[in-house]
Image (cartoon, rainbow, N blue to C red):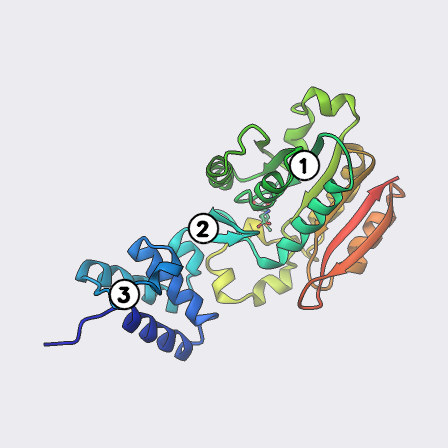
Amino acid sequence: MPQAWTIKKLLDWMVSHFTDEKIDSPRITAEMLLSFVLQMERIQLYMHFDKVIGKPQLDKLHSLVKRCIQNEPVQYLTGRCEFYSLSLKVAPVCLIPRPETELLVERAIEFLRSRTGKQYVCDLCTGCGCVAAAIAKNFADAKVIATDICDKALSVAAENIKKYGLEQRVELLQGDLFKPVISQLDEGNLSAGGFDLIVCNPPYVSRSEYEKLDAKVKNYEPKLALDGGADGLDIYRRIAADAAGHLKKDGALLLEIGYQQGLQVKKLLEDTNAFGRITVEKDFNNNDRVITAVKI
Ligand SMILES: C[S@@+](CC[C@H](N)C(=O)[O-])C[C@H]1O[C@@H](n2cnc3c(N)ncnc32)[C@H](O)[C@@H]1O
């Protein structure tokens, strides 16, 4: 009789298979797929190492492993992603939140904590709502307006906002950058003269970089979430032109940027003469990642 497939045996097999196939983070990927199929938390796998897995679940796992080997991102296969200690829904209509983007959230929360009273935040290009949700969850006095041009991505964001009970403090609006905001600003914000903070992780991949992206990204993640125009700076130009008009004096603009876009985006903001204290910060890989500018 063939030996039964236990959780331990399956994990060992997947880790070795994923390593051979050069899949990123083989163990985490294996744990994510198996815990998804078994509807368990990852930690529970280790508490049930000897549990024998039945044929229907083995078949489901087998098909997911095959798709994973063909470069389909594990987050789309499981429909889940961890971001800033939140467990969020993701779908192929939205970008998979990246660990690098946590730096943007970190700086946003720090800025909000340096101020007093209710804080009005605008999250442009919200996608699955990861930045808006992380800010609202960690800063109780924040009222966030989050926009995205893609209504399907906003449906995913709505589920994430609801999951964390943030519906009263995060409003989702469909449209092009600031366009849906103008007529929708709530009274408190209007009378106080704009947002305290604008954050955005826009599409910033240039045409030439887009062609060279990993198959995992290029074949599965939405082009709308990545394509920043010929030089990758299209959305930054538009934000630089409009952001100051939506910010209070001393309000901050925080943007995620590509790994070598620091100088160019800094220049775009300097040229507006509307911002001071413009700083570029690098991420844990020593790449340009977040630019901060304060409205003067
Ligand atoms: C890089 S993703 C960021 C998603 C999410 N904020 C994150 O950090 O993972 C960019 C998002 O911008 C949206 N987008 C692209 N062009 C836009 C535009 N002109 N106005 C508003 N949103 C736009 C895309 O639909 C996508 O969800």
Mark 2: C-beta under 8 Å from nearest atom of ligand 1: no
State the CA–CA distance, disc 3 to disc 2: 21 Å
Element on which disc 2 rests: loop
**Residue holding disc 3:** 62
Element on which disc 3 rests: helix
Q: What amino acid type is highlighted by mark number 3? A: His
Q: Is residue 277 above or below residue 212?
A: above
Q: What amino acid type is highlighted by mark number 2? A: Pro
Element on which disc 1 rests: strand
Question: Are there few (<14), some (14-19), or many (20+) residues within 10 Å of tag 2?
Answer: some
Callout count: 3
Mark 3: C-beta under 8 Å from nearest atom of ligand 1: no
**Residue holding disc 1:** 122
Of badges 3 and 2, nearer the viewer stands: 3
Side (left or right) of 268 relative to 98: right
Q: Is residue 78 above or below residue 126?
A: below
Side (left or right) of 28 relative to 6: right
Image disc number at residue 107: none
